[in-house]
Image: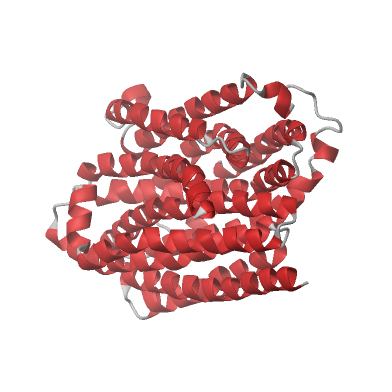
Amino acid sequence: MRHSAELGRLAVPVVASRAGILTLALADTVMLGPLGAEEVGHYGLGTSAFVFLLVCGIGLMFGTMVETSHLRGEGRLVDTGAVWRRALPYAAILAGAGFVLTLFAEYYFLATGQSPDLSREAATVTRIQGIGLIPMLLYICTNMYLEAMGRPMPGMIAVWGANILNIPLNLWLIDGGLGVDGADGAALATTLCRVGMMVYVVGYVWYLGGRQEWGIRTRPVPGWVVGGRTARRHGYAAGPAYAAESGAYHVMHIFAGWMAASELASFSVNMNLLAMIFMISLGIASATAVRVGVAHGRRDWPDRALAGWTGVFWVMLMLTPFALVLYLMPMETMSVVYRITDPVLLAVMAPATMLVGAAMIMDGAQFTLGNSLRATGDAWVPTLLNFLGFVVFMIPAAYWLGIVLDRGAAGLYEGILLASGVVMTILALRWTWICVRKIAG
């Protein structure tokens, strides 16, 4: 009960903040819906490339949370501010590199077999979203620090404030404000909201009442290059794991781009729904990593094991109702959430929608187990398993089911479901072994 209560106290605002990040894209997709499947497809494909770069950056920043939670568990609160200050320039450099890559998006989409028109329209979305990489990664690393210190509320307030702002911005920009419209306008609206999120959380930490106790305004010695090695080392392992999974999902989007416009729209909308539900997993997994990291810092091995399994239990319990609703009422869900009224398009979407919830239960459990392992310092095994499961297994399986067998978007989601189940099973065995080894030793 203690871990459930602590996990709930931390996870609820973390889940809300993670969900808020995706509801920005959800609002964009819903407000683009009346413009037709092609505009939704442009936004979905263009955003998928941006999301891949963002998720890579989040993974590389994961060490901010791990190192902060370890220091907190050891009672060294005054040293935690240095972790945050060292993370800021690192986040800016990662984001700058990602932005440069977005400038070549059109060439990338053409190289992956997309049509010239689709490549051009999707690339514009990617480039506009890319401008938001710097504020977004600065927001993420600051929010990771706050969550590891047990203060998740500011991040939640920032992201939901951005969601409120996003609606009127979309109404203005989708309709042609500032010289952009459609999917480009939605992307610009979200980018402006991300700037506001960054300003709020960075300002919150800088003017925090307990900043002396946390060492927030103390210049870190050594600086971020040398002093940030520990945090970066954790990130070097988490980054490729996040990239493997996110990159595999992006490849699914490429496969969908080879299909009919209705199948691409189906995959894009369902992927948006999948990502939205996954934010519950991401929030619980982040909170679980903090709880595991604090117990690890105390060297309390039974409590560390309990923290990890508690997170897995709650993520599966929370996602089960979503899986049931999506399986039993796929067309009703799409028509209500996305305002889709075309019965033909709804019929195309339904088989994929039925699989989304089940895939997320598996994916949420494996992600929570992976975060728990990384919080113990077991960094590279989860990365290897993610690569094998999502790149080596999922991509060929989805290609076979979706393209070769011509099962469309539903076949791609069948591949996702199979891969998530395999990775979840192997990570559960790894976590069990790590726990038993320490407790028995």
Residue 171, image x, y percentages: 27, 29
Residue at image position (76%, 32%) is 82
Q: Residue furthest front?
A: 1
Residue at image position (33%, 51%) is 41
Residue 9, image x, y percentages: 48, 43
258 horizontally vs 353: left or right:
right
Residue 420, image x, y percentages: 48, 70
Q: Nearer the viewer, residue 349 or 362?
A: 362
205 horizontally vs 44: left or right:
right
Q: Nearer the viewer, residue 288 or 324?
A: 288
Q: Nearer the viewer, residue 91 or 427?
A: 427
Residue 187, relative to residue 316: is it above or below?
above
Residue 257 in view here: no
Colour basis: secondary structure
Residue 144, relative to residue 78: is it above or below?
below
386 horizontally vs 80: left or right:
left
Q: Quadrant of the C terminus?
A: bottom right
Residue 228, relative to residue 116: is it above or below?
above
Residue at image position (85%, 30%) is 221
Residue 98 in view here: yes
For the image, the number of numbered tags is 0
Residue 325, image x, y percentages: 25, 62
Q: Nearer the viewer, residue 364 or 53?
A: 364
